[in-house]
Image (cartoon, rainbow, N blue to C red):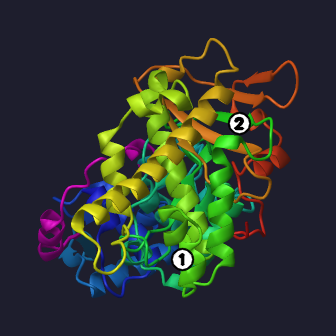
């Protein structure tokens, strides 16, 4: 029920009141009314007395909570608060959030007292004292609410792909402008590693939602048992041969005008013709898509990635189908036969599949420099970052396929001889400037959609 309350839309409700509602349901459930004073509510929920009073009034006015006055033995009237039956019926009609993988992290995050709240409660220190100790830059309740909403849709490695801006605004009560500011704050506080802004394009099948890379290794989340291994790779050349086509696509996307049909036809490749003139924002979204495809190949087919000359023997129908769904494929010239159009589309999707294969093979060759790591037992995510230096620096997130599996952090530098492989037990051991350099974190003050 708290997850449904977290994701539901309540028009006109401010984020502060929405946070209080979720905490109310976390603490007291939805079946029995609760008789507490404002101070007791504030202590239980983890907010100030003024915040508790304002939230209770807002929720009662919105008919989310019902307030009943009941005389007690002392003659004074006690206030009982409970979840309104009409709102509870609305919650029950909402679909059960399926696939939420970070429930314990969400529950822990929503306790407005910091990562050590449980420890302080055991020591008998109240949340009021804990709030007084709050350090600058700590998470406030609205940022906790936003981060919890993002975690609801995050995959095993903390990547959010299928949550649109409008959905986030409806769930949190934030305006688009406030949402942008809050996302920047979460990046500055290292809870969001980076993000890729959404995009609409004539060659993409529908609008692409923004992609958020959450930091599951953050101190606010790590204690829940969610750990993410980091594989940082330094390649040996700026542009590996099998990925030079990325540079060509970037060039035609940025340099050729959309209406210059003659220039497009002179390119001699369905992929280049379709992407010509789309611009750098499109190219960045395209690059992220290719990295997602390569991540899937690494995760599902590590042992099958054996060399470019053997790619004709390899196939992944799931990925090929996804490519066909993600792009609006070319129809061919006017009056073309169906067989010709089918051949053009097959060539288009085949080129993208080949590029994803080459990218996956490139990463496998680099990662294989590290011995005694069961790569075939891991799931991979390539963290997207703008190409400023070709493919020289890349970072990956990995999780073991099994519940218990390999965990660690590697820094692989194949630009030196012999190849350097450093092993670290925790991401926190990596210097901050290196975390910025490899796009494991976004440097404060730098927008998430920094130029390529």
Q: Residue furthest top?
A: 372
Which residue is disc 2 drawn over? 232
381 or 192, nearer to the observer: 381
Residue 179 — which label? 1
Q: Residue at x 45, y 47 (%)?
A: 353
The nearer-to-camera label among 1 and 2 is 2
Q: Is residue 308 left or right of residue 439?
A: left
Q: What range of the chain is rendered magenta? A: 82-106
* Vertical side of 402 occupied by 433: above or below: below
Secondary element under disc 1, as helix, strand or loop, is helix
Residue 91 — which label? none
Q: Is residue 423 left or right of residue 204?
A: right
271 or 356, nearer to the observer: 271
Classed neighbour count for the residue bearing mark 2: other residues with Cα under 10 Å, few (<14), some (14–19), many (≥20): many
Residue 278 seen in the current view: no
Looking at the image, is mark 1 or mark 2 earlier in the sequence?
1
> Could you give the CA–CA distance between mark 1 and mark 2, rounded to whole angstroms?
30 Å
Q: Residue at x 60, y 17 (%)?
A: 373
Q: Position of residue 327 (x, y in %)?
A: 39, 65
Residue 65 seen in the current view: yes
Q: Residue at x 53, y 66 (%)?
A: 141
């Amino acid at each position: 029920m708290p997850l449904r309350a977290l994701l539901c839309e309540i028009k006109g409700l401010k984020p502060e009141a929405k946070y209080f509602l979720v905490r109310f349901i976390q603490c007291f459930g939805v079946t029995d009314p609760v008789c507490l004073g404002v101070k007791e509510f504030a202590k239980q929920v983890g907010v100030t007395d003024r915040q508790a009073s304002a939230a209770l009034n807002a929720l009662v006015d919105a008919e989310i909570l019902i307030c009943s006055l009941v005389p007690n033995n002392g003659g004074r009237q006690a206030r009982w608060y409970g979840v309104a039956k009409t709102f509870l019926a609305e919650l029950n009609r909402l679909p059960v959030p399926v696939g939420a993988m970070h429930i314990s992290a969400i529950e822990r995050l929503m306790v407005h007292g910091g990562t050590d709240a449980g420890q302080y409660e055991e020591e008998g220190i109240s949340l009021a004292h804990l709030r007084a100790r709050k350090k600058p830059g700590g998470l406030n309740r609205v940022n906790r609410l936003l981060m919890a909403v993002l975690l609801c849709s995050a995959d095993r490695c903390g990547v959010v792909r299928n949550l649109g801006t409008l959905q986030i605004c409806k769930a949190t009560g934030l305006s688009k402008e406030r949402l942008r500011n809050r996302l920047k704050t979460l990046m500055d506080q290292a809870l969001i590693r980076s993000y890729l802004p959404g995009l609409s394009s004539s060659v993409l099948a529908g609008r692409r939602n923004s992609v958020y890379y959450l930091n599951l290794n953050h101190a606010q989340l790590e204690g829940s048992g969610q750990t993410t291994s980091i594989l940082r790779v330094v390649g040996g050349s700026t542009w590996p041969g099998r990925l030079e086509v990325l540079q060509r696509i970037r060039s035609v996307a940025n340099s050729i005008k959309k209406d210059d049909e003659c220039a497009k036809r002179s390119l001699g490749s369905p992929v280049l013709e379709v992407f010509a003139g789309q611009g750098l924002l499109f190219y960045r979204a395209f690059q992220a898509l290719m990295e997602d495809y390569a991540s899937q190949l690494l995760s599902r087919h590590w042992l099958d990635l054996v060399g470019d000359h053997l790619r004709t023997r390899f196939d992944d129908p799931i990925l090929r189908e996804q490519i066909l769904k993600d792009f609006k494929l070319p129809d061919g010239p006017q009056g073309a036969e169906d067989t010709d159009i089918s051949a053009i589309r097959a060539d288009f999707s085949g080129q993208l599949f080949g590029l994803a294969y080459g990218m996956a093979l490139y990463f496998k060759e680099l990662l294989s420099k590290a011995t005694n790591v069961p790569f075939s037992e891991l799931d991979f995510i390539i963290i997207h970052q703008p190409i400023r230096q070709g493919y020289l620096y890349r970072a990956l997130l990995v999780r073991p396929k099994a519940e218990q599996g390999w965990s660690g952090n590697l820094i692989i530098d194949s630009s030196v001889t012999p190849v350097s492989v450093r092993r670290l037990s925790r991401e926190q051991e990596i210097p901050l400037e290196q975390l910025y350099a490899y796009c494991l974190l976004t440097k404060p003050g730098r927008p998430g959609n920094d130029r390529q």
